[in-house]
């Protein structure tokens, strides 16, 4: 879930600690990764020493300690440039220890206070990741998925030509799959309860709103089942026709064709729908 942020961040942090000064990975992290020497102590509690100790703690994966150091820096030296950078680094530490609410809060404040900061794109991206990590599986409420989608879309809209936007688009595809999966789960439940009209509404949403997901073939097949259950054979045939046109070799199309054409074989595999089970019982 974190293939992009962590390697770039830790790689870029290593070089300043070795005394190389300002470093960035293709400019992605910018000035927030500046750090003094690794030998800097905390005796004088200067902003430089606090920041350096926080970076060292992040490199050692002591995330709670890092968050505390960056928080101390912000409180004791609120007007220093180090405090501005520390706010993002603190959010990163919270993100890495799965404290997503705290990370989002810090990033919201950073975005509000520093909208023109050179690393504002990274702040938006990290914020979207904190939402994305909270996406639950498709069996549960997907309000979090919708919020994550909004945050990811914000990254794409604001910074369309960045690596952040490219990664956000990939994650949006996965989030759409989650949302489509939830609609499918509810639709299948309605089918089991013989609430066919309600099921049709869910399956139609998958077909209309989540066309790029891998749930669409099954949704079209379930529409065929539901329409047949209501005696709407023409509508069932249209759903099967759309399925066959767009996914001609898909097993779900073979099953739909078998529902409409008595004697036609079903696809191999154990995926019988409700109508198929009922059909086999009657015939």
Image (cartoon, rainbow, N blue to C red):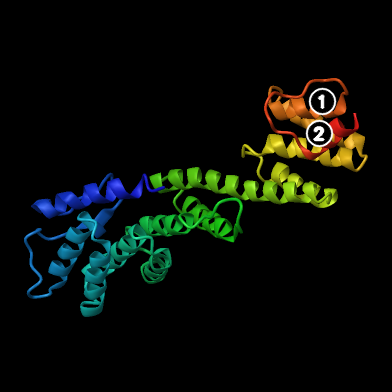
Toward the right, the furthest residue is 231
> Looking at the image, is 154 positioned above or below residue 277?
below
Looking at the rendered structure, the secondary structure element under dot 2 is helix
Residue 185: x %, y % from top left: 68, 48
- Name the residue at 12% across, 73% down: 46
Residue 3 picture quarter: top left
Q: Is residue 244 visible?
A: no
**227 sits left or right of 95 in the view:** right
For marks 2 and 1, the one nearer the N-term is 1
Which residue is disc 2 drawn over? 276
Residue 64: x %, y % from top left: 27, 66
Residue 85: x %, y % from top left: 26, 64
Q: Between residues 258 and 49, which one lies in front from this camera angle?
A: 258
Residues at circles 2 and 1 in contact by the CB criterion of under 8 Å: yes
Toward the bottom, the furthest residue is 76
- Name the residue at 81% across, 33% down: 276
Q: Between residues 139 and 48, which one lies in front from this camera angle?
A: 139
Q: Quadrant of the C terminus?
A: top right
Density class for disc 1 (Cα within 10 Å; few <14, some 14-19, many ≥20) is some
Which residue is disc 1 drawn over? 258
**140 sits left or right of 129 in the view:** right
Looking at the rendered structure, the secondary structure element under dot 1 is helix
> Looking at the image, is 283 positioned above or below residue 49?
above
> Looking at the image, is 114 positioned above or below residue 124?
below
């Amino acid at each position: 879930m974190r293939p992009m942020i962590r390697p770039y961040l830790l790689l870029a942090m290593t070089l300043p600690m070795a005394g190389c000064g300002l470093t960035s990975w293709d400019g992605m992290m910018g000035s927030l990764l500046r750090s003094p020497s690794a030998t800097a102590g905390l005796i004088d509690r200067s902003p430089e020493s606090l920041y350096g100790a926080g970076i060292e703690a992040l490199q050692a994966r002591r995330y709670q300690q890092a968050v505390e150091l960056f928080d101390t820096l912000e409180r004791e030296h609120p007007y220093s440039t180090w405090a501005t950078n520390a706010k993002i680094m603190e959010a990163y530490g919270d993100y890495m220890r799965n404290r997503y609410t705290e990370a989002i809060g810090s990033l919201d404040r950073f975005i509000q206070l520093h909208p023109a900061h050179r690393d504002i794109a990274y702040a938006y991206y990290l914020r979207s990741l904190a939402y994305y990590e909270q996406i639950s599986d498709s069996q549960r409420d997907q309000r979090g998925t919708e919020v994550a989608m909004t945050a990811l879309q914000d990254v794409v809209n604001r910074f369309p030509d960045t690596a952040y936007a490219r990664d956000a688009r990939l994650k949006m595809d996965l989030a759409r799959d989650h949302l489509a999966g939830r609609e499918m789960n509810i639709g299948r439940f309605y089918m089991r309860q013989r609430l066919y009209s309600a099921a049709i509404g869910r399956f139609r949403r998958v077909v209309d709103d989540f066309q790029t997901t891998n749930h669409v073939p099954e949704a079209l097949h379930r529409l065929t089942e539901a329409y047949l259950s209501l005696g709407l054979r023409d509508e069932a045939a249209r759903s099967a026709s759309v399925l066959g046109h767009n996914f001609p070799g898909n097993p779900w199309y073979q099953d739909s064709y078998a529902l409409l054409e008595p004697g036609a074989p079903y696809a191999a595999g154990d995926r019988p729908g409700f109508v198929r089970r009922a059909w086999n019982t009657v015939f």
